[in-house]
Amino acid sequence: MRQIIYFIKKFRYFLLFIVLETLAFIVIIQNNSYQQSKFVNSANAITGGLYNKANYINEFFHLRKDNQLLSEENARLKNLLEARENKFVLDSFTVIDSSLYFQKYDYSTAKIINNNYTKRNNFLTLNKGAKHGLAPDLGVINSKGIIGVIKNVSPKFATVLSILNSNSNINVRLKNSNHFGTMVWDGKDYNITQVIDIPRQALVKAGDTIVTGGKSAIFPEGIEVGVVKDFKYAQNKYQIINILLFNDMSAIGEVQIVKNLHKDEQINLEQSVVNE
Amino acid sequence: MNNIALNNVIRFVGLLFLQVFILNHVNIFGHINPMVYIAWVFLYPVRKTRGLFLILSFLLGISIDFFSDSGGVNAFAITFIAYFRLPILMAVLRKSDLDYAQFNLKTLTVNKIILFISILTIIHHFIIFSLEYFSFSEFLNIISSTILTSIFTILISFLGFTLFTKKK
C-alpha cells in the first residue's frame, strides 16, 4: 500500500498529464465521428453569447454589402414572380389544384455570428437555436449557394458543419446532365471545392454549372453551387473536378435555414428498403 | 502572491479573448492564423509544483476549443507543451536544476528566449495540425502549415514579450 502511495506521489504530475491528455483525446475522437453530436462546441450560452456581442459590432462594417446582396436577391425573386404571373394570366380559366401547393421545404433566416474558413475542419456559429425551430441536419444556404449542414443546437445557438470541412459530403449534380457526384473539400483554397464520383460517361467541360442534387434529404434540388474550374481525367474516369464556388465563404452573414418537411418520410422509406 | 494570481487570471482571460476574437480572424496571406495564446505556457511562473499549471493550461486549451469548434485539439496540444516545458527549459539552459524562486524568463538572453519559444511553438503547432488533418497522406500540408504558422506565432509572441516587459 505504502509503495502504491509512494508511486502515485512520485509520478503525480505525469499521472495528471496522462489523465488530461486522455480527456482531450476522448473529446477529439468524439468530435471526429460524424454521427455523434459533440459536447465541445460553440453553440452554448457563453461562447454563443460572446460571439453574438462581437458580431453586433462587426456587422456594421458589412451593412453596405449586405444591403446590396439583399436588393440583388429581391430583384431576382421579383423577376421570378413576374414570370409566374404572366403564365397564370395567359390561362383562360383558373384551376385551383391543391397539389400545386404541396410544400416540401420551409425556410427561415439566421445570421452567422462566427465564421471560419481557413482551418481544415471549419464550423460556423448561428444566432438561432432549438427555440427558433432549428435542429441537427438542416441545410444552411444563402442567395448564392450552399453553406453547410447544422450539426449541434443549443436553445439559442447552433453550429454548422461548413462545406469547407473534411466531414462534409454533399450530393451535387451537373446542371445540364443529371449525373450525380459528391462534393468534398481538400482543405487548400476556400473558394474551390472538389467533386468526386462523377460517372465517366458524364460530359464535363470547364464552365459547367454544378447544382445540388436531389438525392440527399437535406437540400432542395437545383441550388446553384459553382462552376467547373478544371478537372483531371485519367484511367478512364474523372479523378477530380475542381469547383469554383459562387459563394465567397469568407464573407457570409445572413443565411437561410432549409427544413425538409418530408424528410422523415423519405428516410423511413429508404431505410425500409435497406432493411429488407 | 495575490498579485501573481490576479496577473494570471487577467492573462488567462486576455489571451483567450485575444485569440478567439482577433487572432483567429486575421488570416495572414489568406490562411495563416497565429496561435499566440500559448504565450500562457511561456509566461506562467516556473515552480516546482506543476499541478495547477497543468490543469489551467488544459482549461485554456479546452476554452479555445469551445470557441473555435476544434474538438479537444488545442487542449491536447497545450497540455503536452505545458508538461514538457520544464525539461525543454532545462535543455535550453543546459542545467540540471533551477533556482525556482529566483527564476524569471526576462533574465535570459534573447537567443535563449527565442530558442525556448520556438521549440515549444513548433511542437504545439505540429500536434495541432496533425490532429486537425488526421491523415498521413497530408503530411506535406501538415509540415507547411506548421512552419508558416510557427513563424508568425514566434514573431508575435516575441514582439509582445519585449514590448510588455519592463526592463529594470
Image (cartoon, rainbow, N blue to C red):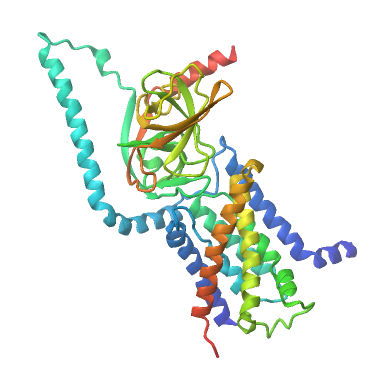
**Which image quadrant: the N terminus of chain A?**
bottom right
- Residue appearing at x 53%, y 69% in the figure: B155
- Residue appearing at x 25%, y 49% in the figure: A65
Q: As drawn, which residue projects farthest toward the bottom?
A: B168
Counting labels gives: 0
Is residue B5 visible to us here? yes
Residue B164 is situated, as x and y percent measured from the top left of the image, at 49, 79
Residue B40 is situated, as x and y percent measured from the top left of the image, at 57, 69
Q: In this view, does B8 lie above or below A240?
A: below
Is residue A157 visible to us here? no
Is B126 displayed left or right of B15 in the figure?
Answer: right
Is B125 displayed left or right of A267 in the figure?
Answer: right
Residue A6 versus residue B126: which sits nearer the camera? B126
Residue A139 versus residue A119: which sits nearer the camera? A119
- Residue appearing at x 54%, y 22% in the figure: A237
**Which image quadrant: the C terminus of chain A?**
top right
Residue B139 is situated, as x and y percent measured from the top left of the image, at 64, 46
Residue B152 versus residue A113: which sits nearer the camera? B152
Q: In this view, does A244 lie above or below B78?
A: above
Is A12 displayed left or right of B74 in the figure?
Answer: right
Q: In this view, does B21 lie above or below B43?
A: above
Residue B108 is situated, as x and y percent measured from the top left of the image, at 64, 82
Q: Is residue A58 above or below residue B47?
A: above
